Amino acid sequence: MDLENKLTRAQIEDIQLKNGVKSINEVRNDYGLNPVDWGDLPLNQDLLMSPNNATYNNMVEFKSLEKALTMERLRKEY
């Protein structure tokens, strides 16, 4: 798989995660990674931005976890 295909795959996965089509654990499974406890929760940005939602207070944590997943995925592929 070349770099362009990897980028396309990452962009598609990002869209699927943001739209709630796939969970973090589903994406991790595709890369042969172990599931994480919070990985079955939807990663919907609209829900995260709602101050009335309890998840709002954890937005920074979700962003850092999303970044960690991306970095882990890139390290595994290279």
Image: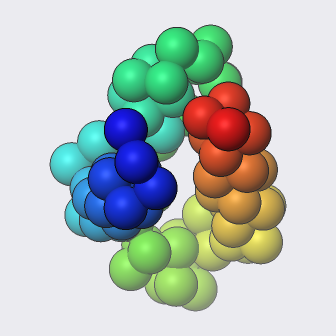
Which residue is at a point 48% across and 39% down the rendered structure image? 24
Which residue is at a point 71% across and 60% down the rendered structure image? 67
Which residue is at a point 39% across and 23% down the rendered structure image? 30
Instruction: Say if 41 sits above or below 40 in the image.
Output: below
Specify whether 77 is left or right of 4.
Answer: right
Closer to us: 2 or 8: 2
Specify whether 65 is left or right of 49.
Answer: right
Question: Would residue 1 be seen by someone viewing this image from the given angle?
Answer: yes
Quarter of the picture holding the N terminus: top left
Instruction: Say if 11 sits above or below 38 in the image.
Output: below
Specify whether 75 is left or right of 48.
Answer: right
Specify whether 31 is left or right of 4.
Answer: right
Question: Would residue 72 be seen by someone viewing this image from the given angle?
Answer: no
Q: Percent position (x, y) of residue 54?
A: 61, 64
Q: Percent position (x, y) of residue 37?
A: 65, 24
Q: Percent position (x, y) of residue 3?
A: 46, 55
Q: Percent position (x, y) of residue 57?
A: 73, 71
Tell me how the rendering is colored: rainbow
